[in-house]
Amino acid sequence: MARDLELDLVEISPKAKPPVCKIIDYKKFLYEQKKRDKAQKSKATKVIVKEIRFGPQTDEHDYEFKKKHAIKFLSEGAKLKAFVFFKGRSIIYKDQGQILLLRLAQELEEYGKVEQMPKLEGKRMIMFISPKKK
């Protein structure tokens, strides 16, 4: 039948009993399958990560300014990576850095939840906050 119609016999589901086959144009079938996969891929959510950098002795005004940006990022649906960067010998103030990040997490509680608690990696103390679902 496929030869008479000048089309291809394509096995759709080989594991079914009996196997499922269709008489279609194979090139067109591949094209539409690629198109379907591309559309499905474009609908997948892309995670955006925004960063906010603090110093161990960040001033109150700077802290509030950066907190405002963090609120904006989380309300837009982006993940937040807040970190304290220790320059030179300021690593001795790592407890201040942790207090700063925990304070930020507490104040952003209504906008997002902490994904990873503050953790020291080299000269950075990093914390991730993911946005709350609407």
Image (spheres, rainbow, N blue to C red):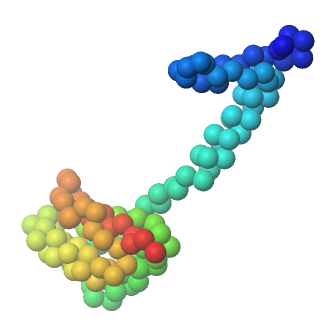
The image quadrant of residue 115 is bottom left
Q: In this view, does 74 lie above or below 13?
A: below
**Residue 122 in the figure: left or right of residue 18:** left
Q: In this view, does 28 lie above or below 111?
A: above
Residue drawn at (11%, 71%), measured in percent from left and top? 95
Residue 41, given in percent of the width and then of the height, sits at: 59, 46
Residue 75, given in percent of the width and then of the height, sits at: 46, 77
Residue 18, given in percent of the width and then of the height, sits at: 59, 18
Q: In this view, does 44 lie above or below 98?
A: above
Q: Residue furthest top?
A: 3
Q: Which of 99 and 41 is in front in this view?
A: 41
Residue 1, given in percent of the width and then of the height, sits at: 84, 13
Q: Which of 2 and 46 is in front in this view?
A: 2
Residue drawn at (45%, 66%), measured in percent from left and top? 78
Residue drawn at (79%, 28%), measured in percent from left and top? 28
The image quadrant of residue 58 is bottom left
**Residue 109 in the figure: left or right of residue 40:** left
Figure disc tally: 0
Residue 66 seen in render: no
The image quadrant of residue 96 is bottom left
Residue 113 seen in render: yes
**Residue 71 in the figure: left or right of residue 40:** left
Q: Nearer the viewer, residue 56 or 81?
A: 81
Q: Which residue lies furthest to the front in this view?
A: 18
Residue drawn at (29%, 79%), measured in percent from left and top? 109
